[in-house]
Image (cartoon, rainbow, N blue to C red):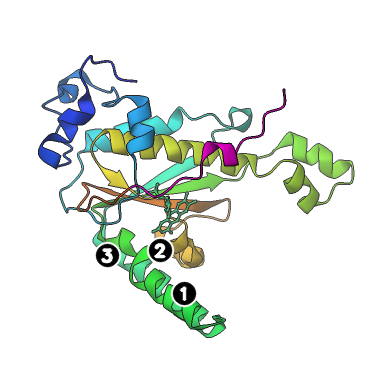
Amino acid sequence: MCLWKVDHRSLLWMEGERTADHTACGHAVMGWSPCMELAHAIQGRVSIRRFKQTPISDEDINRILDSARYAPSANNTQPWNFMVIKDRTLLKKMGDAVRTMVDRMVPFAENETQVQRLAAYKNSFYTFFEHAPLVIAVLLESYDAGTDTLLARMGYERDDIKRLRPWPGLQSVSAAIQNMLLTIHSLGYGSCWMTGPLVAQDDFKQILQYGDDRFIVALLPIGIPDEQPLPRTRKPLEALVKIFK
Ligand SMILES: Cc1cc2nc3c(=O)[nH]c(=O)nc-3n(C[C@H](O)[C@H](O)[C@H](O)COP(=O)(O)O)c2cc1C
């Protein structure tokens, strides 16, 4: 929700140009506060895959990361942590690792369509993060889930436990990611939730030096949008909801 009485989205989108300059809405001096109505932020966010090279201020990076902390989490475990990657050499190494991995997948493609899809992943959908001015890697830390331990003692297998309680840790981190995506959008930047590049997780572990107690669940490239994609279609609500009266 917006603490200001004016429509900050129209301010941020002045003359059809997105900008991360908050001088117009005063937030640069007022400190943290969302720049948009919540519904506008939710409905107006789209995945952005092309970015201007304009750097992102440390203040905005902190706002984005800070919004993640407020997400709900299973047992309040807050099982997330974040790596902020601006280093072009590291990003290039990560992109190269993804390309190598996609190349290794090609011989296993079932048909020409899948080969072409892999080419698109390699050239764009899995690798465009390396051109963003900044990438946040979102990590899930392992933690002790007491309930799962009890279920295991009762004789439930690992797969059964996952079926009963599907990935509470991953759900928690996903909430943190969505908080960040909405904050990124409300600040006038763009991003895209990316899991495709994680085919190279084993290489990322070497490149970014993290241990076996955690893994990256998503990359969020961030920057001022250099494209204005149309919103993707959405399934109608009636197709999604069952009401028990
Ligand atoms: C878990 C998850 C993983 C995704 N991974 C990728 C990805 O690797 N590359 C990509 O280009 N888009 C990726 N996306 C973005 C989706 O393609 C996008 O959210 C979807 O098409 C809807 O479009 P919108 O975000 O513009 O509403 C991912 C989205 C989610 C939620």
Q: Main secondary structure of the magenta part?
A: loop
Residue contact at pointers 1 and 2, CB within 8 angstroms? no
Task: Give whichever of discs 3 and 2 has the lower sequence position.
Answer: 3
Which stretch is magenta? 231-245
* Residue under pointer 1: 101
Return the x and y of residue 200 as percentages of the image width and height: 47, 67
Does 243 appear in magenta?
Answer: yes
Q: Is residue 25 left or right of residue 66?
A: left
Q: Amino acid at mark 1?
A: Met
Examine the rendered structure and indicate whether residue 42 appears above or below residue 54: above
Tag in front: 3 or 1:
1
What residue type is disc 3 on?
Thr
- In the displayed structure image, the side of residue 168 where residue 25 appears, left or right: left
* Residue identified by numbered label 2: 207
Q: Nearer the viewer, residue 6 or 19?
A: 6
Q: Tell me if residue 104 can be seen.
A: yes
Where residue 83 appears, x then y in whole percent?
A: 39, 48
What residue appears at the point 42 percent right and 48 percent down from the top-left corner?
A: 233
Kind of residue at disc 2: Ile
> Of circles 1 and 2, which is in front?
1
Q: Quadrant of residue 184?
A: top left
Is the CB of the residue bearing disc 1 within 8 angstroms of ligand 1? no
Query: What residue is pinned by disc 3?
Result: 89
For label 2, the SS is: helix
